[in-house]
Image: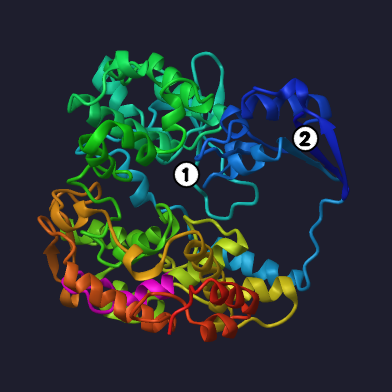
Amino acid sequence: RPVYLLIHDGKAELKDASALRGKGAISTRETLKHELGKAVRVVAIGPAGENMVSSAILTADNDATGSAGLGAVIGSKKLKAIAVRGTHRRVNVAQPERLKELSNWFRDSGRNFPEVINRWVRDPFREFKTVPGPELKKDPCFGCLGRCARKVYRSSDGRKGKFFCHSAYFYQPWVDRYSGDWNQSPNDVPFHATKLIDDYGLEVKWIDRTIRWLLNCYEAGTLNDRDIGIPISKLGSLEFIETLVQKIACREGFGEFLAQGIEKAAEPFGPEARKQVERAGYLSEPGADVYGPRLYIVSALFYAMEPRQPIQLLHEIAFVVSKWLVSAIHGVPLSHVSTETLQAIARRFWGGELAVDFSTYDGKALAAKMVQDRQYAKESLILCDFLWPVTDLESTPDHIGDPTAESRILSAVLGKEVSEEEYYRIGERAFNLQRAILVREGHYGRAFDTLPERDFTVPVEFDVASPDCVMPGKNGELISRKGAVVDREQFEKMKDEYYALRRWDVATGLQTRATLESLELRDVARDLAQRGLVGG
């Protein structure tokens, strides 16, 4: 029978959750809050987690989610939710005054959610429009120092919820196409689509990609409404999204195939359906490249090394470049990130100016390693992806950020000095641990460190932030990546350099025992060695 875990002031108890079986994640959260008190913090799964759908998520307070299949892991243990309540709410840190000084520095620096990114969703070129009018209210995370642009939406029926970034606009273009322009005929369908996905306990990005695959197959004549029991012809309607999400979360009919991911779902339908998997992409159509490797060369290594879209890695360089673009494209200083500032940031954060010269593959391997190590350490600290690292500052004369900020925060919390290099080593260790797990599970090094074929063969035609694919080149000159693909030979050379920087075996792309042991991962090194999965 299902249970939920109640933790009260450090005491844990398993409680019967039979009455919650089949309930949505949001419904479960609100039910437990009603029973246990509003002060209780809850993380829960929906039907997708109970049925161990591969993309099932955890849903927490303020509509925060834990993705990457965590919902399926929890569901496999018959655990419906975790509820936490405590009377001792103060978290003790070793050096509170120092931490307060760092918080004040961050607050006074003016660092905030990059408005330039917020403008992307209003770009008429791509018709990514946020919800209009007073329906939106700001609702940042607890303790946010960055004046974040996170929003809560209230629909016409009184329902409220987070409506932000990808979840806010992914279904909107389909609604426009199905029922007319959203800004002309406001309706709540995009909001309800997102909340439906949250409640069933599925990941919005994963559903978005699934929809793209279904539509591509429908237009190619490979799938139709009747055969799969999902009204693809009504894409953009509430009926379509309700049917799709329910079938996947409950593994009903064709939803049984989709619950395993579109790669698995495509197998019975032949080469055309498998071809459409690549076309489904991430966040973009085949000709577009949101943070992708045809536009941002360094992203080729991120995508090749990661099991899913590595959004936090993609953001670090792209956020700064997008601020540079605001001024570069218009020829007037609309942003504090000039060419000189961009290059200075690249020298301080990414190993040199070549990191932001997108006319060459040089310098990208070092930049990729530095970004990965920094981001994996940042994720371990649970710092906001929109605000950290502090790469740039509008309030300072040189506008260059401070890469030591995170290590200083950690030092204040622990009460012992953690240098910038020691902080990055934490990230390097975490990244290598993930790599070891991936290798153990079948990602056998170099041959598996690759990209979808479309990145090598389909030229990039546009980008959300820059329709003409304008990027910084040598010495910051404006170049266009329009028509570019990833060069296979240069990509392999970039991998050579990357493996060497990682101290992995260059020929195989496998980690060496010596490298793992130097990172205090001796047990991991021993396990991989016994499996024959270490290089050199």
Residue 109 counted in the magenta span: no
Do residues under tags 2 and 1 come within 8 Å of each other at their CB atoms?
no
Quadrant assignment, res 499:
bottom left
The C terminus lies in quadrant:
bottom left
Quadrant assignment, res 336:
bottom left
Mark-to-mark CA distance, 2 and 1: 33 Å
Instruction: Point out the frontmost of discs 2 and 1.
Output: 2
Q: Residues within 10 Å of mark 2 (few under 14, many from 20)?
A: many
Looking at the image, is 273 positioned above or below residue 440? above
Q: Position of residue 278 (x, y in %)?
A: 26, 45
Relative side of 523 to 234, left or right: right
Nearer to the camera, 411 or 336: 411
Q: Position of residue 480 (x, y in %)?
A: 12, 61
Q: Position of residue 348 (x, y in %)?
A: 40, 80
Q: Residues within 10 Å of mark 1 (few under 14, many from 20)?
A: some
Res 259 seen here: yes
The N terminus lies in quadrant:
top right
Identify the residue at horizontal 44%, vertical 36% (top origin): 204
Amino acid type of the residue tagged 1 in the rendering: Ala
Relative side of 172 to 49, left or right: left
Q: Which residues are magenta?
A: 355-371
Nearer to the camera, 186 or 458: 458
Nearer to the camera, 302 or 443: 443
Q: Earlier in the sequence, mark 2 or mark 1?
A: 2
Relative side of 505 to 416, left or right: left
Amino acid type of the residue tagged 2 in the rendering: Tyr
Q: Which mark is residue 149?
A: 1
Relative side of 503 to 185, left or right: right
Residue at numbered disc 2: 4
Instruction: Report helix, strand or loop for mark 2.
Output: strand
Looking at the image, is 161 positioned above or below residue 473? above
